[in-house]
Image: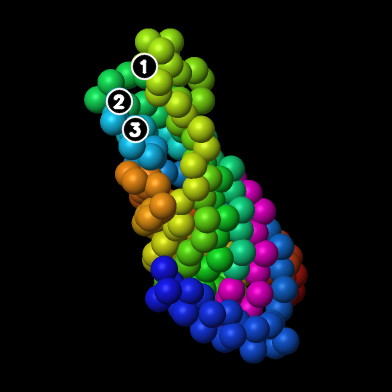
């Protein structure tokens, strides 16, 4: 955790030095997980995993600070996996997660390019997770199984393309918590980001006539 704090501090100093030169924008982030798995803290009673494939959606606000080929972004999403379940021992259905992420975006993923351009991003943050949201089966409740919200620390990498306020990317996100044995999350999916201020600047061909 000491190394992570040092990296965050250095990133923060760099970002602070750039904020005064930045364009600021607001928008939305939407993601679709191709595969995700949430692992509760281990209780020694039942399987702590809850996985979902092809049916997890997330949506939330996003702020952009940047210019040219670099942008610092902050986003918060609410994601739901209505069909999330444990294959090891079916205890109930559904899962939710709430990632709060800060990211450094480069190239096309900064969202300021007027031509489609490739780019990448790296980031980190917090995530709150809960599984079996549609009801934990009574037989597991009787055994002492609980499904409360648990926190993880996220790291994420993504690659994609961007043009005039729109960014599309493929991402991998992993979360862990060294204080909670077995607690983790993994997400692999696609994300679409919209910077409304940059989208307004798109000119239609007929406007040049």
Name the residue nearer the viewer: 72 or 165: 72
Q: Is residue 18 magenta?
A: no
Q: Main secondary structure of the magenta part?
A: strand
Image location (x, y in percent) of residue 198: 68, 69
Residue 77 in the image, given as x and y percentages of width and height:
59, 48
Where 109 sits versus 17, above or below?
above
In which quarter of the view is residue 12 placed? bottom right
Seen in the image, is 51 located left or right of residue 153?
Answer: left
Residues 46 and 163: in front is: 46
User: Would residue 106 be visible to someone looking at this image?
Assistant: no
Q: Secondary structure at mark 3?
A: loop
Q: For the residues marked 2 and 1, what is the alpha-carbon distance in whole angstroms?
A: 7 Å
Q: Compare residues 50 and 41 and report the one nearer the observer.
A: 41
Q: Mark 2 = which residue?
A: 45
Q: Residue at x 46, y 44 (%)?
A: 32
**Mark 3 nearby-residue class (10 Å; few <14, some 14–19, many ≥20):** few
Labelled disc at residue 152: none
On-image quarter of the C terminus: bottom right
Pointer 3: what residue? Answer: 43
Mark 1 residue element: loop
Q: Are marks 2 and 1 in contact (CB under 8 Å)?
A: yes
Position of residue 184 in the picture relative to residue 112 (left or right): left
Q: Residue at x 38, y 40 (%)?
A: 41
Residue displayed at 52% across by 61% down? 125
Asked if the residue at tag 3 contacts the one at tag 2, i.e. Cβ–Cβ closer than 8 Å, the answer is yes
Which stretch appears magenta? Answer: 57-72
- Residue 5 point in image, percent of width and height: 48, 74
Image quadrant in which the N terminus is located: bottom left
Which disc is residue 143 wearing?
A: 1
């Amino acid at each position: 955790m000491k190394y992570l704090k040092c990296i965050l501090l250095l990133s923060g100093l760099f970002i602070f030095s750039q904020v005064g030169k930045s364009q600021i924008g607001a928008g939305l982030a939407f993601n679709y997980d191709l595969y995700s798995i949430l692992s509760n803290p281990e209780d020694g009673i039942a399987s702590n995993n809850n996985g979902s494939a092809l049916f997890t959606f997330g949506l939330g606000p996003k702020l952009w600070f940047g210019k040219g080929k670099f942008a610092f972004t902050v986003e918060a999403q609410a994601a739901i996996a209505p069909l999330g379940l444990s294959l090891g021992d079916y205890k109930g259905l559904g899962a939710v997660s709430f990632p709060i992420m800060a990211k450094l975006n480069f190239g096309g993923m900064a969202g300021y390019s007027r031509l489609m351009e490739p780019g990448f991003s790296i980031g980190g943050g917090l995530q709150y997770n809960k599984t079996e949201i549609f009801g934990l089966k009574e037989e597991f409740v009787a055994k002492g199984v609980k499904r409360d919200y648990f926190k993880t620390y996220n790291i994420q990498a993504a690659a994609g393309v961007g043009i005039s306020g729109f960014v599309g990317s493929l991402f991998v996100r992993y979360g862990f918590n060294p204080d909670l044995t077995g607690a983790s999350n993994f997400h692999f999916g696609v994300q679409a980001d919209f910077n409304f201020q940059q989208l307004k600047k798109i000119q239609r061909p007929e406007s040049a006539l």
